[in-house]
Image (cartoon, helix red, strand yellow):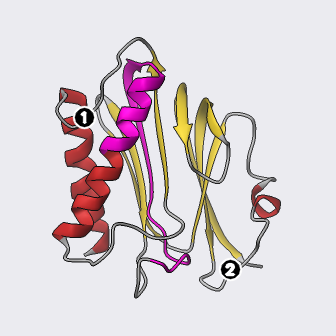
Amino acid sequence: MMIKRVVQIDLKKDYLTLTSALYPEGITFINKLISVIVKKEYCNTNPWSDIKKYANNKSLVFMTASEKFLFEEYEDMKLFISTGIGESGENAGCTINIAVFVDQGLNINGLVDLVRTVEEAKCGALRDLYLPFTGTASDAIAVGSLVGEEYFAGPSTELGKKVARRVREKIKELLT
């Protein structure tokens, strides 16, 4: 069996989510996060066949070979990060998966802005650690919010600053 462990986290509410994770595609409402931890030698060109029994219509599924992860709840957001880095950023067996769910009403533009904020924070953390790459071949990001009209969640907004600081700190903690 190539699956070592499955971590399931109930988010306790529905979040409008934009994601590049394995499941689901694009934009949808989710209320559950699942991290499928596989062996380092995992190689399947159809990973959906391995995760379909865990996924449902309101779940977000990441896959990784890294067993280093955290899930933290704050007053205004939930944060999940799993990290693993091999000898090069191209090693798909080691992945950085990040999910941020904010209790603020964003629209689609706000979610896209939040993706940018999370990605910049990830790159900043890797730079802080003097790593010569900005990610791995299999990294994924998911951002979710309550439905609203806020257009901006970039690093110059109050929300963006909080998200960027927490993502950057936690990636560095997990990788050191």
Residue under the point 55% across and 42% down: 19
Mark nearest the camera among 2 and 1 is 1
Above or below, 80 relative to 94:
above
25 lies left or right of 74: right
Q: How many marks?
A: 2
Q: Which residue is mark 1?
A: 160
Q: Which residue is mark 2?
A: 42
- For badge 2, the amino acid type reads Tyr
Viewport quadrant of the C terminus: bottom left
Viewport quadrant of the N terminus: bottom right
Above or below, 104 relative to 77:
above
43 lies left or right of 87: right
Residue range of the region highlighted in magenta in the rendering: 90-117
Residue under the point 19% across and 28% down: 157
- For badge 1, the amino acid type reads Gly
Q: State the residue in front, 165 or 110.
A: 110
Q: Are marks 2 and 1 in contact (CB under 8 Å)?
A: no
Across and down, in percent, residue 109 comes to 42, 25
Q: Give the Cα separation between the discs numbered 2 and 1.
A: 35 Å
**Residue 111 located within the stretch drawn in magenta:** yes
2 lies left or right of 68: right
Residue under the point 56% across and 74% down: 65
